Image (cartoon, coloured by chain):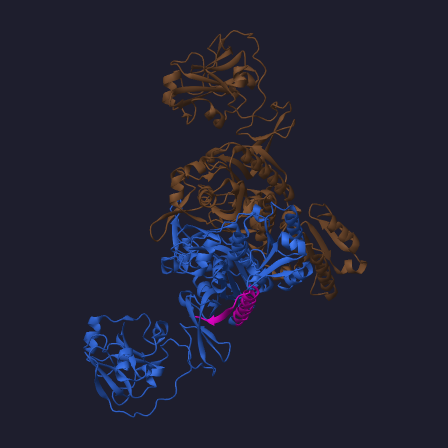
Chain colours: A blue, B brown
Amino acid sequence: MRLSQFHLRTTKETPADAEIASHRLMLRAGLVRKLAAGIYTWSPLGLRVLRKVEAIVREEMDAAGAIELLMPSVQPRELWEETGRWDKFGGQLLKLQDRKESWYCVGPTHEEVITDLARHELASYKQLPVTFYQIQTKFRDEIRPRFGVMRAREFLMKDAYSFHLDDAGLDLEYRNMHAAYTRIFTRLGLKFRAVQADSGAIGGDASQEFHVLADSGEDAIAFSTGSDYAANVETARAAAPAPRPTPAEDMRSVATPVQKTCEDVAALLGVPLARTAKSIAAMTDEGFVLALVRGDHEVNEIKLAKVEGMAGYRMATEAEIAAHLGCEPGFLGPVGMRAPARVIADREVAAMADFIVGANRPGEHLAGVNWGRDLPEPDAVADIRNVVDGDPAEDGGQLRIVRGIEVGHVFQLGRKYADAMRCTVLDENGREAVPAMGCYGIGVSRVVAAAIEQNHDEAGIVWPEPMAPWRVAVCVINPKQNPAVIEAAEALYRELQAAGIETALDDRGLRPGPMFADMELIGIPHRVVVSERGLSTGTFEYRARSAAAAENLDRSALFARLAAGR
Amino acid sequence: MRLSQFHLRTTKETPADAEIASHRLMLRAGLVRKLAAGIYTWSPLGLRVLRKVEAIVREEMDAAGAIELLMPSVQPRELWEETGRWDKFGGQLLKLQDRKESWYCVGPTHEEVITDLARHELASYKQLPVTFYQIQTKFRDEIRPRFGVMRAREFLMKDAYSFHLDDAGLDLEYRNMHAAYTRIFTRLGLKFRAVQADSGAIGGDASQEFHVLADSGEDAIAFSTGSDYAANVETARAAAPAPRPTPAEDMRSVATPVQKTCEDVAALLGVPLARTAKSIAAMTDEGFVLALVRGDHEVNEIKLAKVEGMAGYRMATEAEIAAHLGCEPGFLGPVGMRAPARVIADREVAAMADFIVGANRPGEHLAGVNWGRDLPEPDAVADIRNVVDGDPAEDGGQLRIVRGIEVGHVFQLGRKYADAMRCTVLDENGREAVPAMGCYGIGVSRVVAAAIEQNHDEAGIVWPEPMAPWRVAVCVINPKQNPAVIEAAEALYRELQAAGIETALDDRGLRPGPMFADMELIGIPHRVVVSERGLSTGTFEYRARSAAAAENLDRSALFARLAAGR
């Protein structure tokens, strides 16, 4: 591509609302332009990158045996009523009425549409297993769209759906898709991890997220040094604690006149924070609950909600706390409660001896507390805390916490949608069977932003080669002053193109400084400068985007270098 | 593609609401499935065809220098307010509110979005001319969606927009796009014509439509045998009539007790229909108008509206007719009107002598009527009729009428949008200039349906080769009974694929009848049968989709035949 014939428009300004690097750089490089909150136009430059991602996703989905189709964006309410999601999906569902006042939504996902298709198209077990996919524009009416295309409202997604006669078949395809995703993100040149996930609102069985690793990532991921175990901190588990030691102290009252946090109490007493336990007061349909985690831990709300009887719990109000504990927050604890309450202890807390808790009296804590002696054994013991960096892993390794950006998700949906929508096929015995389903998504436009979060520097984007708009930029110095230079550049450009190396010829006539800055900002992996000086010595100035300095190469060395990079 | 690994699902049933061949065949071949009124899923088979069209469109747009980008589907109301189209666009505009109760529409077209982009991205004349395009899903809330994807509500469109410093530049790009469209439809293998069009609601200057020719087409197109002149009958012009002959008859009253139409009156009097003139009563802001066309002609409402003073006219009510002509419809005429009225005569009527009109008295017509003697010369003479087959053309040839399906449109928009949205660039002198715009659309999904309308027979679709889902079908007879047959078929399939010939291997194990019927229904251009009998004679049974019979070819003759067809 001759850049004089292309629409490239970079800018130095960084909009105030661009909080993260990828958002700033995508706007500065002109990859996208905002049309409205969370709604972006992909510029010619941005679209080149988006199409690279799309092509790799498509190739690997095809290679994995998935079959591409294209479902509509606008979907009728009736289908969403069948699954109950018309109401349950929440505010992200963009609803609308057509001229006949029938209700529709702009599709945020396509489980309903594909299940409707399946119940009409799939009649026999002979048509199974089958996996359909599409690469299609979706809309989710985010309450707070931000971070550019990272959390946009309109976005491009690859969504796939599989149908199986039995769970074993689903499991096989789930692994097949997992492998395809691994190939996709590997081919894209990204550092990533597949992590166990909480499947959240979509529901179902096995579920893994694919995260592009980046310090700015929204999600914290725990992985083990001892195996390929990785999980979102929402669900990550550490090894169970060692058995509870024998009590060594008597319970005693400690004056903590202004010390309301575990940190302050531990500092006052000169003991490790891990010797304290903090109390979280919650309400369920069945009454008041006190949940305990170690002072250096945080309660994990998802895990807590999974403890029996805790589904749909909420935090207790100050009045409820006063009624049950007879005390204001800051000095709460499981000893000497005014009214009976259920006590749920994290595994670590249940394994503590001689620990410190609030005394349920203002300005007072209790130290040397022991289960079974100073208070009853907990009503329930469970893993209800977030893991932390350095926790022992179940596999014997250590847990490390990194940050990631979710770009893919594989789910075993099971029969939830097929049941709700009465999708059946005839099995080998001619009986109606409800197929098991899987669904597999990749946020195609989000991958672009995530790649930038992972790969950028002060000067701009540093594309992994497979995602770069062009692999090579041929920069021409003073093309108008020197016909020999533009001729040599054109010849090199044609040669590179002929060799199948995607090249941008920067023949815009910019001065070297702004031209080089543009090529660095838009992240072209290889830069070749054609200048009068180079012509006189028979060399080209070459610099890899990731290299510190340029070097002078003759033609054959240059081609060898560019061929090697593929 | 091995069809055993593909989702092919044909059906014998024809839905009752499928009125035209392409709609029936697309459903029977399983190219699309209806999700809701005017909203379709493209099956794997259908998507293969859609992508073929898309690829050719993209290649030719790129070759013509247009630059691809991708604009959003959901567009904010504010932009549409700037051009006044939020209200003016009408019921086709699908409006919606997001969770913050801001108004948006699902984009039916992108003039507003591209002009907004241009006013931010284009600063200088140096960036002009530039043509952007996208291939993107659009929504128009048709009041009566029908004919399958031919008049769907959600559809795939290629839309391009160009920006120019002056009208000459716009004209150049308009011709460039016209040439690109000609290449696109030629490469698609379709019979088509570029016709002059009335630009309708979008407004602007030059405008041409590209029509795929098909007897079932909604639009009537007039073309000349004498040049490449072609126009929608809405705007087509015939040659001007010969000068008015000298009157030869006296005006006389004719009793027509029950003859209210020109046809009936001509039959009663035994004269050609072309000797009669019919009167159309209309109202404008300035009063009552009587428009006259020959009895064998139809008034063209678009042409009539373009006559001075007629913009926004409407048909007169019976009361208005009675007030001005003193008579009920069926016997109206320009002679002896009760109140003064403006008379607009079609050119042909103005050139008549001794003609027949209604007498403005029930049961009575006037014959031998002559302008200037029996009634004043018309207030205006204009071309206000539809041309008919056989009319003399302005270029000396004859006009022929064919039917077509509009699949593309090129417009010179001029400065309408740029003016309304205050889009300017700095010209060579540093002064702000409003750029001239062009817009250029192709209904990508509609092209698929139009191609079928033009190319089908009793057995199904007959794809032009460039649009076929696969060029060749290799049909295997009794694969399970004879391993040698499936081996030979697999070998042929691999050879064809290696030769770059897209092939479907029908290894589904169907009996020959249903298998051949499927391949004919889905329109594969070349069919090769691999059977035990063929193996024994070293031949393959070959049949072109369009040929009446099959022939037996050896391997080299087969490959020569398939290579020739490209």
**Main secondary structure along the magenta-highlighted residues:** helix
- For this view, does A183 lie left or right of residue B141? right
Location of the C terminus of chain A by quadrant is: bottom right
For the residue pair B334 and A318, the one nearer the viewer reads as A318
Residue appearing at x 48%, y 82% in the figure = A395
- Horizontal side of B100 relative to B238 (left or right) equals left
Q: Position of residue B310 (x, y in %)?
A: 43, 23
Where are the magenta residues, as a range?
A: A168-197
Q: Is residue B457 visible?
A: no
Query: Is residue B175 in sight in this rendering?
Result: yes
In the depicted structure, whether residue B494 falls above or below residue A102: below
- Residue A179 placement: quadrant: bottom right
**Residue A213 x/y as whole percent:** 48, 68
Q: Work out which residue is located at the far right of the displayed protein and give it.
A: B537
Q: Position of residue A354 (x, y in %)?
A: 29, 88
Number of numbered discs overlaid on the protein picture: 0
Corner quadrant of residue A153: bottom left
Q: Position of residue B452 (x, y in %)?
A: 60, 44
| Vertical arrangement, residue A360 with respect to residue A174, above or below | below
Q: Nearer the viewer, residue A41 or B509?
A: A41
Q: Is residue A149 left or right of residue A352?
A: right
Horizontally, residue B483 falls left or right of residue A276, namely right
Indicate whether residue A175 is drawn in magenta.
yes
Is residue A290 one of those drawn in magenta?
Answer: no
Name the residue rendered at 46%, 60% in the picture: A111
